[in-house]
Every structure is written in C-alpha cells, then in structure tokens.
C-alpha cells in the first residue's frame, strides 16, 4: 500500500471539523481519494497544527484499500486555522463642554463574530473625554476587545474609530448669542452715527470678533 500526503487549512469557525478542507495527494497519476471524519487537533488558531483524525474512502479511480495514512502529526499531516475577519466600530457620542462622556465599554458594534461567541467589553479612549476638551469632534479609539467566550487571537481584528462631539453648554450658547446681539446693536449705532474715525469697521467683522471671543468661535 502507498502512503498518501495530507494537509489541511481553513478559516476559524469555532470547531475542529475539517470537512472540505483536507488536501490528499496519492502520488499516482489519475487516482484520487476522498475522506470522512477529518478533525484538526485544536479549534484555536494558535494551537491548531495537525490533522488528528481522518478516514480515507474511495475517490475518482482511487481505491482506499490501496493506500495508507501517514503519521498524524504536525510534520506528516499539517493543518492550520486562519483567523476570521472581525470589525469593531466605536459608537459615536456627544457630550456637553464641562461634562464627562459615558464612553461605556459596550458602546460599539461588531461584524464577523461566529455564532455563540460574544465580545463583552472594548476599551474606548478619546482626547475629548476630559471636562475641558475643546469644542468640536474628537476620535474615539477602540482597542483590547475581551469576552468570556471570545479569544482575540482567533480573529484578525480591525478597530474603527468613532466620533466624540463636544458641544457648548446652554450657558455658553446663550452668552455667545447675547454677545452677538449686543455687537450688532452697537455696530449699527456706530455706522448710523457717522463717526469718521471708526466708520471703516464693518458689521460682519465685529460679529466675527464676538464669536472669536467665545468657545463657539473655536468649533
């Protein structure tokens, strides 16, 4: 009987099953074999290394009785599991200036997890999370996903940023609007007065100055 050559590779699916994943070489032209009951030694990407179980059956012009299996070890029957693709996206969030954002560890969405596995927490970081963070948009950076039934090493993980928007407080908004209204009133009075040494000032310039003097002007 002739010894066949074996190898296997497939994408992580949380099982040891190698259906449709084993390659068998008979070494005899025009003869091929099939198989049943093939399993890898471990379901984990980091631990899978060889075909643990397999039974040869007749194939195209090949009789299983004419062949034997090699030693089922990492050298003679190598096997590998390829990490599944996983995407983790941080949720967008909005906070008011002077307050702290939630940035809860479950504020994310994921795509690519196999059934019966779940991510419990994701670390979220943003430079906009401090109380005195500038107004505007700041990245929320996710990392370090963990879960009781989830092993990151079984996945090729892409972490996608979210956006933390820092908004002015109601007090700052009302103060800025009051300043704009006051500037408009004063500017119109100046223009209507005809005073020559300040006639060159434009209304729009003075309003812009009022905005610049508030945090709203730095959005």
Image (tube, grey):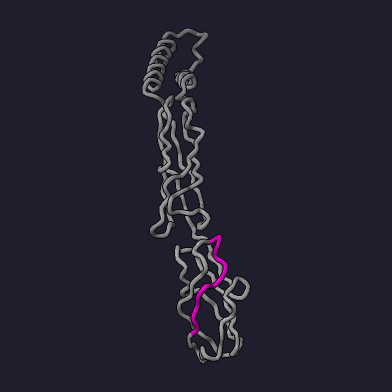
The N terminus lies in quadrant: bottom right
Farthest residue to the right: give it. 75
Query: Is 123 or 49 nearer to us in this picture?
Result: 49
**Measured along the vertical axis of the image, is residue 140 above or below residue 197?**
below
**Measured along the vertical axis of the image, is residue 144 above or below residue 1?**
above
In the image, taking residue 87 as reference, residue 47 lies left or right, namely: right
Q: Position of residue 209 (x, y in %)?
A: 49, 19
Query: Is 114 or 57 nearer to us in this picture?
Result: 57
Residue at x 49% of width, y 87% of height: 59
Q: Position of residue 156 (x, y in %)?
A: 52, 56
Q: Find the magenta span and give its range.
A: 45-56
- Is residue 219 magenta-colored? no
Q: How many marks?
A: 0
Q: Position of residue 169 (x, y in %)?
A: 39, 24
Q: Position of residue 186 (x, y in %)?
A: 41, 12
Residue at x 45% of width, y 65% of height: 15
Query: Is 18 or 157 nearer to us in this picture?
Result: 18
**Measured along the vertical axis of the image, is residue 151 above or below residue 23?**
above
């Amino acid at each position: 009987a002739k010894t066949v050559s074996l190898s296997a590779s497939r994408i992580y699916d949380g099982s040891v099953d190698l259906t449709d994943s084993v390659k068998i070489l008979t070494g005899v032209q025009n003869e091929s074999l099939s198989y049943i009951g093939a399993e890898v030694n471990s379901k984990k990407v980091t631990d899978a290394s060889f075909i643990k179980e397999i039974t040869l059956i007749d194939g195209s012009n090949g009789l299983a009785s004419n062949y034997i299996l090699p030693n089922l070890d990492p050298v003679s029957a190598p096997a590998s599991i390829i990490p599944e693709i996983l995407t983790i996206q941080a949720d967008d969030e909005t906070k008011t200036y002077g307050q702290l954002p939630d940035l809860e560890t479950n504020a994310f969405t994921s795509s690519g997890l196999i059934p019966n596995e779940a991510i419990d927490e994701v670390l979220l970081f943003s430079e906009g999370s401090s109380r005195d963070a500038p107004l505007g948009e700041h990245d929320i950076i996710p990392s370090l996903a963990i879960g009781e039934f989830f092993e990151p090493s079984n996945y090729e993980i892409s972490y996608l940023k979210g956006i933390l928007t820092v908004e002015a407080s109601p007090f700052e908004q009302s103060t800025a609007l009051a300043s704009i209204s006051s500037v408009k009133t004063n500017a119109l009075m100046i223009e209507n007065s005809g005073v020559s040494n300040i006639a060159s000032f434009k209304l729009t310039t003075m309003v812009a100055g009022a905005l610049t003097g508030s945090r709203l002007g730095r959005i």
